[in-house]
Image (tube, grey):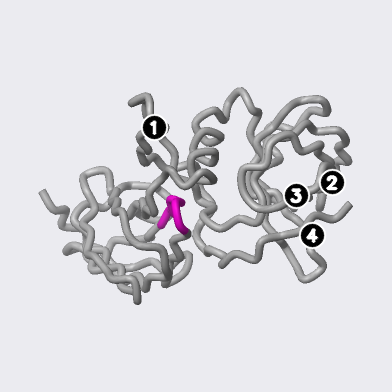
Amino acid sequence: MRLGRSHLVRFTAALCSFFISTVTVADNKTTSVCTDYPSVEIVFVGTLTAFTPSQTSSSMRFEALELLAGESSDGITVLQEGGSPCRDPAPIVGERYLVVAQGTNWKGDYGCADLKREADATSEIEYFRLARSGLTSTEVSGEVRITGEGTPVRGAKVDLAGIAGGTQLTSNAQGRFHAVLKPGTYAVTTRFPIGYESDNCGGSTVTLEPHRCARLVICAKPRSGGVNPIE
């Protein structure tokens, strides 16, 4: 059965590991999660009922147990494309998973953006529950790093400008920055510290959905002639 989809604004960013942000819940505990997928079509917890492995596009069939974002029916098919982060480790029929899926083409097919065993995804599940209930802020969390090696860049000035307003953020010693903003689409421009320049990746805009945290990755590279790090 094909599921209905909420047509959300697509977010283009490098798909990397989950980046940390904090969300405070009612009992004063914290859930640390900021996803790479602020406007995915569907997020759910489900049991894998069938898996057809392939070198190119494996098919996974799930029984949806809890819908966390988007719209769904009981039976959901998600495809693993070549190079998908959902391939390692191989999924096991009968296991329960947190599934993050995105539309892949005009036919309405869904591709797997992330797949985690339910037991290993408690923070992510709690975050999506809070977001669905409107209990989280609209945030952007990001990092500025050297392409390939992952070395953080300190002191980069990241400007976010949009109809909803704007702000300037500065990357810290870990290359990270964070802000709570109004929902909307923001143009992203970056001024790098001496010794660094842009190494383009991802898009030049970021879209913040209400009550969601979007992750922004900015790539840098050393200028020819060496790097003068900021102390």
Magenta-drawn segment: 210-216
Q: Which amino acid does label 2 sit on?
A: Ser
Question: Which residue is found at the position 30% from the left and 73% from the top?
Answer: 161
| Residue at mark 3 to residue at mark 1: CA–CA distance | 27 Å
| Residue at mark 2 to residue at mark 4: CA–CA distance | 11 Å
Q: Where is residue 222 in the image (x, y as percent from the top left)?
A: 29, 61
| Residue at mark 3 to residue at mark 4: CA–CA distance | 13 Å
Using a 10 Å C-alpha cutoff, classify the residue at mark 3 as few (fewer than 14 neighbours), some (14 to 19) or many (20 or more): many
Q: Name the residue under label 3.
A: 72
Q: Does the magenta stretch include residue 119?
A: no
Q: In this view, does 225 lie to the left or right of 128?
A: left
Q: Mark 2 points at which residue?
A: 59
Question: Which residue is found at the position 21% from the left and 48% from the top?
Answer: 172
Q: Name the residue under label 4.
A: 109
| Residue at mark 1 to residue at mark 4: CA–CA distance | 35 Å
Q: Mark 1 points at which residue?
A: 25
Question: Which residue is found at the position 64% from the left and 28% from the top?
Answer: 118
Q: Helix, strand, or loop for circle 4?
A: loop
Residues 216 and 183: in front is 183
- Relative to 138, residue 164 above or below: below
